[in-house]
Image (spheres, rainbow, N blue to C red):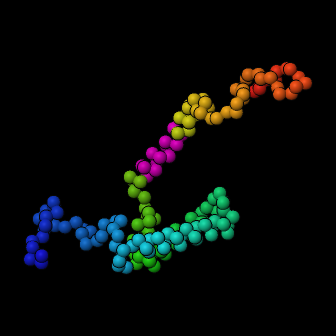
Amino acid sequence: MPNDPPRSTGGDAGSSPPDAGRPLPGAHESRAGGTAWPRLLLGLALVDVLFHGAATALGSDRGQAGLLVCALVVAATLCVERLLFGEPPGRAARALGVDRPRARGLLAAAGADASLPLVWMAASALLPFLVFLVPRRAGAATPGTTVATDAPARATTTPIGP
């Protein structure tokens, strides 16, 4: 009701957070008004078509032109934020993560980077145990053993392996 006193937000009486009038990140409303889902899907489709088309046109099936394709995709995503959602360029760039990195993000990236050798070491340590999960042909020998050949003219054994 218009005459109701303002509710307390848990802070000092009469104070409000600096961004009290702004929508929360991830809200389903945008500056252009209405729900954002149709525009989000349209923007995603446009950027995806550009991404695929640019990579194909540049022959970048394994990232050969990765920096150029990345620059095109980031620029297209910023344009989608501006044209479909009405976001100012600076706010759109910050929302997409094109901003000065924070210490928390750098620590998370360093942690993920440091864990990659651990994955490699764990996989190599488990490899002898995982070999037994690979299906084998019936009658196939393991490396280092001998098996009789199928040739009817010879009844000798042939070494398998090194």
- Spot the residue most to the top: 156
Q: Residue at x 69, y 64 (%)?
A: 59
Residue at 39% x, 57% y is 102
In this picture, which residue range is highlighted in magenta? 106-118
Tell me if residue 37 can be seen.
yes
Q: Which quadrant of the structure image shows residue 66? A: bottom right
Residue shown at 37% from the left, 79% from the top: 32
- Inspect the magenta stretch and tell me whether residue 133 lies in it: no
Return the x and y of residue 21 as percentages of the image width and height. 25, 72
x and y percentages locating residue 13 in the rendered image: 11, 65
| Closer-to-camera residue (17/145) | 145
Q: Position of residue 107 (x, y in %)?
A: 42, 49
Q: Nearer the viewer, residue 18 or 133?
A: 133
Where does the image place residue 97, in percent across and percent down from the top left? 44, 63
Q: Is 94 situated left or right of 73 in this image?
A: left
Q: Quadrant of the N terminus?
A: bottom left
Q: Is residue 77 visible to the viewer in this orientation of the structure?
A: no
Please, is residue 68 above or below residue 87 in the view?
Answer: above
Q: Please, is residue 77 above or below residue 137 in the view? A: below
Placement of the C terminus among the 4 image quadrants: top right
